[in-house]
Amino acid sequence: MGKRKGTALPAANPRRSDAMSFTPRVFSGIKPSGGLTLGNYLGAIRRWVAMQDEGMETIYCVVDLHAITVWQDPKELPHATREVAAAMIASGIDPARSILFNQCRVSEHAELGWIFNCVARVGWMNRMTQFKEKAGANAENVSLGLYAYPSLMAADILIYHATHVPVGEDQKQHVELTRDIAAKFNHDYGVEFFPMTEPVTEGPGMRVMNLRDGSKKMSKSGESDMERINMTDDADTIARKFKRARTDADALPSEPAGLAGRAEAKNLVEIYAGLSDSTPEAVLRQFGGQGWGAFKPALADLAVQKLSPISAEMSRLMADPAEIDRLLARGAERARAIAAPILARTYEIVGLVR
Ligand code: TRP
């Protein structure tokens, strides 16, 4: 049995292929805090659908326990939780082929999260850039949960022995921490129990930027609604937002190199490419030399054409919240069938008598 190592990060595991000896299994999560944007769709949900459609075993979770690390109005959280589930289903997540549920229904997440709080080191948490950004100057006054968030995220992943986690660049550090926690657990208890999970950042999936300021990520919490496209926006709103999106005075270039230093222009071209399952190269071959007066209406039409069937399906699903709850409950049962034996074995390894 290995000795506890103090605060040093464990050395990078030389056997990166460890995850290979585990059955490939995909896990990812999305927080129900506020509405969903085009950024969630193009950046995350679309890729989750693709992985499901490739026939992988996929587990997708509405991470409500993560949402409450910052204040959520209890009158709004149930709606937000169901809306994220509805958005996933409307976008093509099939609750029969994927396991889809909300986190608090599977208490194994929180239980393993506690074990991992005892494995992860304070020094590791202090290095998490997302915490530093979110807490900012207010670090003394944020919840303890926000600080421990990455450890619960590791539990979300490892309670299923998930091998692959599709995430945006901003979450990569958390997946690396997940590997550090797995490695330290395995080392400290002398087991090969948790896999070395891989983040998946390639494939369809992109970082969508703010329509008013191309240096900022499109976020559900920004001050102005004009800076984002919400998944529930109607056709007129989508068109208006794209037409008023900030751009520069130059025409579109004929190749991506011409987008350097033009954050807003680059973002709109990438959104067009994302929505049309194409590439910026192809988009610029078509629109190079044209002005925004031609491009923006084309982008608005494309966005309406792609997003309005999804938002229509979302409202249809949201009209029957009880049915969404039934789907989530069924998903949670299937999730628990995987999680419970892994938690039981973890308790045994740790020496907790049950
Ligand atoms: N932290 C992720 C985000 O903010 C959400 C999340 C929670 C997650 N648990 C996860 C993502 C597990 C992937 C795997 O986007």
Image (spheres, helix red, strand yellow):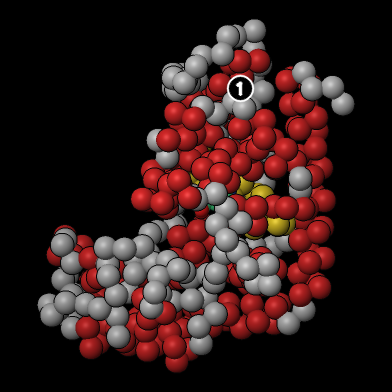
Q: Which residue is situated farthest in the front direction here?
A: 140
Viewer-side residue, 309 vs 217: 217
Using residue 294 as the reference point, say whether residue 318 is left or right of it. Answer: right
The picture places residue 118, in percent across and down from the top left corner, at 62, 27
Q: Is residue 303 visible?
A: yes
Q: Which residue is situated farthest in the right direction here?
A: 354
Using residue 157 as the reference point, say whether residue 288 is left or right of it. Answer: left
The picture quadrant where one finds residue 95 is bottom right
Viewer-side residue, 328 vs 113: 113
Q: Is residue 278 visible?
A: no
**Is 336 drawn above or below residue 86 in the view shown?**
above
The picture quadrant where one finds residue 110 is top right
The quadrant of the rendering that contains the C terminus is top right
Q: At x 41% / y 79%, what residue is drawn?
A: 225
Q: At x 27% / y 67%, what residue is drawn?
A: 214
Q: Amino acid at mark 1?
A: Phe
Using residue 9 as the reference point, say whether residue 24 is left or right of it. Answer: right
Q: At x 69% / y 62%, what residue is drawn?
A: 94
Q: Secondary structure at mark 1?
A: helix
Using residue 101 as the reference point, say whether residue 198 is left or right of it. Answer: left
The picture quadrant where one finds residue 221 is bottom left
The response on whether ligand 1 sits within 8 Å of label 1 is no
Read off the residue under disc 1.
185
**Is 94 drawn above or below residue 345 in the view shown?**
below
Viewer-side residue, 99 vs 321: 321
The quadrant of the rendering that contains the N terminus is top right
Q: Residues within 10 Å of mark 1 (few under 14, many from 20)?
A: many
